[in-house]
């Protein structure tokens, strides 16, 4: 669009700007390699020749060795983060086991399954411990029926 035209109306000169040619992949890869070499050499020359402070930020292409070091460091940090997540301990309400396992009228297998669910879901486990006995029975009946243990 031209700057003086309303949006949505095509301009006449838009097609005449860009000339496109089919791209030869080998040729373009070689051009990119040559450009990287020239850029790297220019960067090294500017480092050697300009020792004084400068306000401009210099950018250099990473070498293969630098790339390997950074990749290794990234993997190490990911491993450390995973180890920290694995060592995170969940504090289970000490009254949860008794509150679940001594409920009358349910099979031991069903109570174990419900206990396991409540340990995995800390908020529900804490709520279960704070319920009255009649509400615990209601919750267990509903949850176990939903999960085919009745």
Image (cartoon, rainbow, N blue to C red):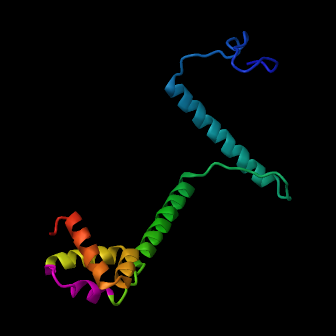
Residue 108's place in the image compared with 3, above or below, is below
Q: Is residue 85 left or right of residue 39?
A: left
Tell me residue 8's x, y (percent): 69, 18
Tell me residue 137's x, y (percent): 25, 78
Residue 150's place in the image compared with 61, above or below, is below
Tell me residue 129's x, y (percent): 35, 84
For this rendering, which residue is in front, 22 or 61? 22
Which residue is found at the position 29% from the left and 84% from the top? Answer: 133
Q: Is residue 142 magenta?
A: no
Which residue is found at the position 72% from the left and 9% from the top? Answer: 12
Residue 42's place in the image compared with 107, above or below, is above
Q: Give the range drawn in magenta.
A: 96-108
Q: Is residue 102 magenta?
A: yes
Quarter of the image where one finds residue 121: bottom left
Quarter of the image where one finds residue 21: top right
For this rendering, which residue is in front, 37 or 22? 22
């Amino acid at each position: 669009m031209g700057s003086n035209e309303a949006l949505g109306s095509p301009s006449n000169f838009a097609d005449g700007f860009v000339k496109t040619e089919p791209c030869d992949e080998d040729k373009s890869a070689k051009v990119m390699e040559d450009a990287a070499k020239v850029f790297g050499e220019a960067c090294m020359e500017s480092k050697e020749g300009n020792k004084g402070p400068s306000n401009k930020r210099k950018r250099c292409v990473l070498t293969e060795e630098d790339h390997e070091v950074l990749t290794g460091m990234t993997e190490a940090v990911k491993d450390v983060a995973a180890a920290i997540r694995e060592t995170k301990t969940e504090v289970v309400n000490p009254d949860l086991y008794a509150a679940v396992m001594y409920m009358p009228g349910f099979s031991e297998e069903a109570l174990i399954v419900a206990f396991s669910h409540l340990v995995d879901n800390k908020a529900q486990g804490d709520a279960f411990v704070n319920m009255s006995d009649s509400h615990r029975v209601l919750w267990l009946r509903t949850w176990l029926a939903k999960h085919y243990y009745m």
